[in-house]
Amino acid sequence: MTDGATDPAAAGSEAVADLLRRRGEQIAQRWADLPFFQTVFTVTRDEAVEAGHAVVDSLSAVAESGRVDDLEAVGFQPIREQLVAMTASRASSGLSTAQVDREVGALREAALELLEADTSRLGAEEVGEARVQLLTLFATLRVLVVDTMLQENQEIVLRQRQQLLEMATPVIKLWDRLVAVPLIGMLDSARSQVVMENLLEAIVEHKATIAILDITGVSTVDSLVAHHLMKTVASARLMGAECVISGIRPAIAQTIVQLGLDLGPVTTRASLADALEWALERRERKELPTRGNP
Amino acid sequence: MSQAAQEPIRVPIRKDTDLTAVRQHVRALAQRTGFGLVQQTKLVTAASELARNTLLHGGGGAAEISVVHGRTGPGLSVSFVDSGPGIPDVDLALSDGYSTAGGLGMGLSGSKRLVQEFAIESVPDGGTRITVTSWADPYSARQGAR
Amino acid sequence: MTSSPSTIPVLDLGGLLLVSIQGELPDESAIALQEDVTTAVANTGSRGLIIDISTLDMVDSFLARVLAEVAASSLLLAARTVLVGMRPAVAITLVELGLTLPGMDTARTVTEAAASFGVTIERTGRDAP
């Protein structure tokens, strides 16, 4: 594809690179008045022109390398961060990805018009090939912008998910060597794992011998949730602490029975208050709460 | 879906003290790859089970440990290779409680639960290769529904 | 299996045996420990055996079996075994492996384990009342 001067595509992209270099200032000036630049750089127009220049330079570098359809082209690297900032700014003023995409699409007109005006320097065939390369280059820029926006959204979702994971599972010290975890909302595998690890770490930290898992706020108990609860109870027992599950609402008790789930040797209580009473009674006894059954 | 980043570390499994070396190598590499304590412990335990399997059933062999990169970020892939008699019935060997060497019968089936990916290639009289892969952050949102 | 003496001491606290397993435990040492402990239980006529594994960063099915067998054979000699100080990551892994050690008692600390045999370990250090 980049096979010297005999390759029309290579000649086309070289012509595009040349055009963007020579007419960079004009293009940046015209872009500064388009919404994609104008609305982001509101302080001075020079700022918008400068940002436009950076984009033109970058496009010119990509065209020179002949990789006009390659998102990973090195030439795109310098403007990635700038595009992140610009698209974030557009998105925060309420524009959808499609709307931002349209604004970026409008950028190519300036370059196309300048290419037409340039025909005196090139033959008709060369202009045709250069136009194809230029259109491809701007199409790639649009994909790059959309890709940046999607990546940014993904980052936000990841961050929020992590925050939710950490926020939703507090471990409370109720009494000397007695801890409780109130579980709220939906329990999926990831959250159950975090709950289990937090609770077991808290058992070590507070030298707890008894832990209360309160599921009053859990919306549904299916076999997956029940399985996770059982694993938590079994792990705590191996560590030398006993678990009691409280807050089993009547509806959930019925579900557990109807699903045929066996909570096995797990101690259960209807309310957190009942569980606390049971725990305090239990602490009075000398024998280990975690007897095996040989 | 995942590819090795560099040459794997090869640890021979010839005698039972070699199991200690396998565990230490896996632990050290898992720590360096950013594994959390629980993920680390699960992988090291699985490696211990499978290395013992290689020693007792495969008549010795080696463990090959390599850092891999997948959709959820970095991970470790550990292969246990022997040229022993092979596993005649893989499905049976993977069931809980199946034991031929007097263990608790949790070696193969149990270690499968400790890792994210598990593959057995076994040829009768042609040896066995068991490869397990574990991710540093298996609950990353990048993994999607889970 | 060759039986070499285990490097792990079995301490006799007067009718109560204490074993603290430290660091990496090769299979051979685990088997030697199993023999040493069972012999010590028989010789001392102890009622209780406390095994502290708080420094272990891994317990696989082999070691779990050794521990379960120690507990079972001690029980035949009328001694109850309490496993002490298992770390969270180790516990999660064992449960995932399907090994919940139903035949063993467990405790957070040696003090609690001793208390279950009616032996009180008083604090004498800085935190003493």
Image (cartoon, coloured by chain):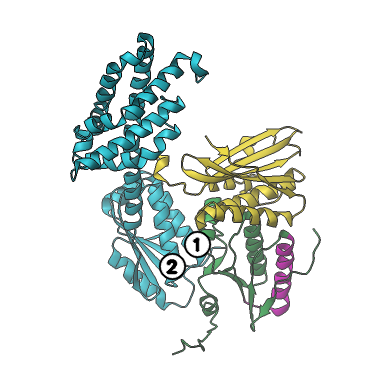
Chain colours: A cyan, B yellow, C green
Identify the mark at residue A135; answer none if there is no mark: none
* Pointers 1 and 2 within a single chain: no
Query: Horizontal placement of A201 versus A102: left or right?
Result: right
Q: Residue at x 69, y 56 (%)?
A: B21
Q: Is residue B77 magenta?
A: no
Residue A191 higher or lower than B122, as above or below: below
Residue A30 higher or lower than C30, as above or below: above
Query: Horizontal placement of A276 versus B50: left or right?
Result: left
Where, quadrant-wise, is the C terminus of chain C in this rendering? bottom left
Query: Horizontal placement of B146 versus A273: left or right?
Result: right
Q: Is residue C45 magenta?
A: yes
- For numbered disc 1, what is the local secondary structure? helix
x, y percent for residue A162: 36, 51
Residue A282 higher or lower than A252, as above or below: below
**Separation (CA) of disc 1 from disc 2:** 9 Å
Residue A137 visible (yes or no): yes
- For numbered disc 2, what is the local secondary structure? helix
The main secondary structure of the magenta stretch is helix
Return the chain for callout 2.
A
**In this view, which residue lies farthest toward the top?**
A124
**In this view, which residue lies farthest toward the front?**
A121
Query: On the image, which quarter does residue C61 sit in?
Result: bottom right
Return the chain for callout 1.
C
Q: How many C-alpha atoms fall within 10 Å of the one at disc 1: few (<14), some, or many (≥20)?
A: many
Residue type pointed to by label 2: Ile
Q: Which residues are magenta?
A: C28-48
Mark 1 highlights which residue? C88
Q: How many C-alpha atoms fall within 10 Å of the one at disc 2: few (<14), some, or many (≥20)?
A: many
Q: How many marks?
A: 2
